[in-house]
Amino acid sequence: MSDIYDEENKRAKLNFISAFFNDLDLKIKFLIELADSGHRDEAFLLSCCYIDWLGLGFWPNEGSYSRFVKVLRQYGGEEVFSYIHPKMLEEALAKLRGKWAGLFLKKVLPILQQSRVKIYNEYDMIVLLSPRLTTGEQAKIKDHLWRGTLAAIVYSKIRSPAVHEFGALDVSFDNTTFRGCPVPTINFQMLHNCLKRIANAAREKSLSTEKWFGHA
């Protein structure tokens, strides 16, 4: 009897999970209609909010900024979001608290300012900065490189203005390259495609583990 009861509970939970993500898929699909009907700002805003919420599902104990960046990089399906823009890293380091951040930025600022013509993966960024850093400083900065990624730019330049101000604008990168080509403009369609991939990943993780987002 206990096994039957457990099996019924399992089926009920999986059905509930499927129904939830089916409903989310409809909401995500509606964002295209919303944008096409002249409400692009609202569609952009909701895309950001849904990505933020899905990040919360994966990492409930992390702050909005870090989980948004992490979910976009890990499940968004756009390699470019994991790459680091020297200017963004410079701005992020300038905002960090602690004496170490100021000293670090002073050391690497000339390199960052001279290297804005392209974006870098984490390994290449460490190599770029290493002539100015000790081994310990290289290890420390690795924990903060995510703050300079294009995913972090999405949070600071799109998500935050969309939530706290009046709409969001596309983000373009003049004279900056990715794999020898211009860095793609970050726009609503690009972010919407990422949202669909993230939602699919959340669904698959939840159904395969029989737990919400694999842990709840």
Image (cartoon, rainbow, N blue to C red):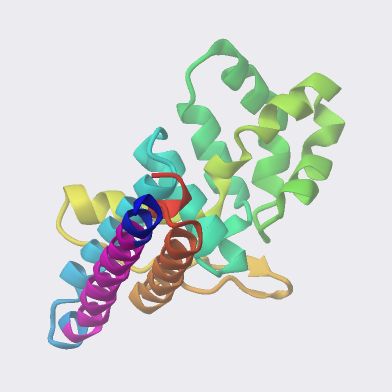
Quadrant including the C terminus: top left
Q: Is residue 17 magenta?
A: yes
Q: Locate residue 6 relative to residue 12 in the image: left or right.
A: right
Quick one: 26 or 52, which is closer to the camera?
A: 26
The residue lying toward the viewer, choosing from 161 and 142, is 142
Residue furthest to the front in view is 1
Asked whether 106 or 195 is in front, the reply is 195
Residue 210's x, y, as percent? 43, 57
Q: Nearer the viewer, residue 148 or 79?
A: 79
| Side (left or right) of 190 relative to 164 | right
> How many numbered discs?
0
Residue at 45% x, 40% y is: 66
Residue 178, how many percent across, how many down? 67, 69
Work out whether residue 152 can be spotted.
Answer: no
Q: Quadrant of residue 118?
A: bottom right
Main secondary structure found in the magenta portion: helix
Q: Position of residue 107 (x, y in %)?
A: 71, 25
Q: Write the residue at 70% across / 55% down.
A: 120
Residue drawn at x 62%, y 66% is 79
The residue located at (70%, 25%) in the rendering is 140
Residue 87, visible in the rendered structure: yes
Decide: is 102 above or below 88: above
Q: Quadrant of the N terminus?
A: bottom left
Q: For this view, does 43 lie left or right of residue 105?
A: left
Specify start and end residues of the magenta stretch as a single range: 8-33
Rendering coords of residue 182 (x, y %): 61, 75
Q: Is residue 176 magenta?
A: no
> Within the image, what quadrant is residue 62 found in?
top left
Q: Is residue 82 above or below residue 122?
A: below
